[in-house]
Each structure stands twice: as C-alpha cells, then as structure tokens.
Image: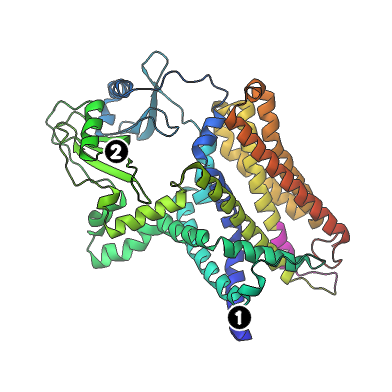
Amino acid sequence: MNAKTLKTWLSVHSGIGIAAGLLLFIAFYAGALTLFHHEIEAWSAAAEPPAGPPPTLADAQRLLDGVLAQAPKMAADIRLQLPHDGHGLRAYGQDPATKTWRSFELGADGQPREQRERGELGEFIYRLHYTVGIPGAWGTYTMGVVSLLYGLALVSGLVIYLPVLARDLFALRWGRNLKRLWQDAHNAVGLLSLPFHIVFAWSGAVLCIGTLLLAPFQFLVFEGKLLALIGPQAGFSRPVQASGTPASPLNVEQLVAAATRAAPGLEVERLHIRHHGDAAAQVEADGVVHERHLSGATRVELSGTTGALLHPVQRPTSYGSGTALLRGLQTLHYGDFGGLALRWVYFVLALAGAFLFYSGNLLWVESRRKHQQAAQPRRASVMARLTLGVALGCIAGISALFVGTRVLGPDRFADAVQPVYFAVLALCVLWALVRPLPKAAFELCVAAAALTGCIALADAAMLGPRLLRGDLLLWTVDLTALLGAALLLLLARATRHRARNGAPHSVWALGV
C-alpha cells in the first residue's frame, strides 16, 4: 500500500474514532454491566427480606384476575411475566384510561399490589447502553448511526494494520516511547477482539435503526406492506381486533399447557394477552426451547378462548433465513448463549472495547503533539480534556449510582438515579476543562477509583452480616468493584509519573 493511500485510511480511521469514540466508550462500559442486568437488580434489592416460596401458575392467575378487577380496561392489552431466570411474577401493560404503563405484583396478602418500577439502577444502565443518555428515540437512532461509523472504523483500522500484522500483533514495546506502547496495546486489543466488534457494530446498527433502514423499501417498493409481511418473523406483534362478543377465557395454566403442546420443550416466560374475555382474544406465549441453535427464542400464538394454534410456531427449527439471522444477531449482541462463563468473557471484551476507544482518543491527542515547543495545539488539549471528563465521568457516575442505591435503598434512590449520574458526569467534564490537564487526569482517576471502591464499603456498612455469611452475589460485586478501583489507582499513579517524568512538551506534562 502506498503512503498516500495509507494516510487516507488513517485519516478515515482517526476521524471516525474521534467522532464516535466518546459515545462508544459510554455504550461499551454500560454494556459490560448490562450483561449482568438481572444480577444488578438482585444486588440493588439485597437489603429487602428474602422472598417466600416461588410463585405458581395459580398465583399468576390470581394476579391477572386481580389486576383486571382493578383496571378492567387493561384487558385490551396486558402482559403476564412468569417467573424465570431471576425475573419474578409480574403483570403489566398500558392503562387506556390513564395512558400510563402500570405494573403489578402479588402482595404478602396474596392480592395484587401496584408496584413502583423496581431495579431502576439496572434499567438506567441498560438505557445508557443504547442511548448514551440522549433522551427519547433520538438516543437510539444516534447509536445506530454511531454503530455504522464504528463498523467503518473497524474496516479502516484493519486495512491500516494488515501490512504489519505478522510482525506487530503481539508486540508490546516497553520503553520511553509511551505513544508506541499505547499504539501496540490499541492494535492488539482491536485485532484480537475483532470478531466481537464486528458483531457489535453490525447488530448495534440493526437493533437501533433497522426499521429506519427498511423505510425506503416499506414505502417505495412494497407500498406500505413490508412490515406486515416480515413483522411477525422479526418479533413484532400482529394487530388484533376485538369481536365485541364476550367469551370465557382459558386460565393461565391452560394457556401454558396449550403452548407447550404446540411447541414441546418450550419454557414459557411471558404471556401477552389481547382482548381478554372476548371471543377474538389472542395470546402470544414467548419463551425458549433448548435446542442446538444459537437462539432458542420461540413464540406460540393461540386463541385465548380455545387454545387453538392461530399461526405456525416460531421456533429455531422453523426459522426462515431472515428470522434466523435477526434472532442470531440479537443473541450474539446480548450474550444470551453459553451461560455465565460466556457472559464474563463478554464482560472482559466489552471493557477492552471501552479501553480501545479511550486509548484511540489519547493516541489522536499524542499524534498531534509538538515535540519541540511548549505551546500545544488547542484542539489536542480540548480533546484530551473531553476524553478524561466523559470517560472517567461515566465510570464515576455509574459507581455513584451503585453507592446511592445501597445507602438509600432502591426505592428512595430511584428518582435520583438519572440526575445523580448526569450531575457527576457534568462535574467531571467541568473539572477536566478548568483544572490543569495533568492534575485533572490524576484527580479524576482517583475520584473514579474512590467512588468505585465505595461500592464495597457501602455493602460492608449496610449489609455486613450478609457478607460475613458468604453471600456470593455481594462478594462478586464487591470484589469486582475493588479490582476496578485498584486498576484506576494504577492509572492515576502512571498519570502522575508521566506528568512529572515524561516528555516536557506534552499536554500531560506539569506546567503545560
């Protein structure tokens, strides 16, 4: 490859990385935690008394009947979540009378109790993963576009690195040239985790803006009928019209039995009931079938009054090519295969991905350093400050949410989750902008480490007896937090060492 072509690809790679790197850092860091979404929800509720015996299908029926007695208009569209994989029994849906989403659980007296949305910590981190904090659908669309740019950055990075692949793949050249060491680490992490990143870029774009990408075909080619054709295969619900004729509905146990007869081996996780008590009632039973396929997602569509199968069962052995591709991308993106061990592998890879974007921004800053003069380009200083503020602010903000949830409790802290995160993030960005850069880098690393370490301290203070009894979930969270705090302190130490002993003409040097 000639020098001009290589320079063009390098410009594409670095330009896209700078444009999308900070957003991708937030998405990957939050995404690493989202892999343990249910565990985070269980951790946040650890101070509550242990639950009683596991709920039964009879309890599910009691909950459904009680909710419809309290809010009869929800019979038009109500969902019943059955206990599975850490999820509890819950009935929820949009109340047509108030146009708000309502959620119910069984109280200690066996009667439905409207619940405040629980697990706000886990839900917020999950939303942060695919919106990076941008409100509404705009956040999702933004991350879809960023995923496309991310894919282009992967291609351009591979083109750049291929000529020296055999020579430099495992090279980590230690010495005074820190830029070369960071470059080696950046290249090695990027290439060794390349298949992971390809899947994430592809699936992220499909999941975030897939329907927008279909819009030209929907309106210009298929005359508005495309989504009706592919919607059920993509997991969209079919529209159902009420007949207006009352009919006796099947109970929950009968519906689950009908679904498992239609799809042997199905573990039903959710029932989506439309027009309960109407002759045209329809039920979608969603769950998983454990077969030798990447995705086990299965859907059975039944009559709510007779249990008759309304449409062919959607299960791995009957997927069309498009459905198999979409379900496979979803499964690969969320790490819903391979069990706990694979989720830890994904966790490490996601954190490595966050490092990739962080190091990429720092390399961009370093490559624009003027080696023989004290005055450095303003754009390099601004990008260094933004990188520090956003990346370390994201880490500190999420750690602060864990601490607040434990100290105040999930219910009392739920309304403060979003404001606290953005307040900590904004404070870190402001600190990076106003403080001397090498001091800000050290101080923000220490602050992020302190907040992360405080997760374990908060657990020890609030739930010491459970820790002493060897609660595995608490120990796992606390040890992970302490390891993260230790790594941040090592980064702080290296930052201070470089500020004092590194190249004098650098944005990271004291006095600049």
Residue 115 falls in which quadrant of the image? top left
Q: Which residue is mark 2?
A: 266
Dot 1: what SS? Answer: helix
Q: Report x, y in % for residue 496.
A: 83, 53
- 121 with respect to 332 (left or right): right
Q: Which residue is mark 1?
A: 6
Dot 2: what SS? Answer: loop
Look at 61% across and 73% down and name the residue there: 165
Look at 33% across and 46% down and name the residue there: 291
- For the record, the magenta segment spans 373-385
Q: CA distance from mark 2 to mark 1?
A: 53 Å
In the picture as drawn, the residue positioned furthest to the left comes out as 245
- 9 with respect to 487 (left or right): left
Q: Amino acid at mark 2?
A: Leu
* Residue 120 appears in the picture as rendered: no
Q: According to the image, what is the colour scheme of the structure?
A: rainbow
Q: Which mark sits nearer the N-terminus, 2 or 1? A: 1
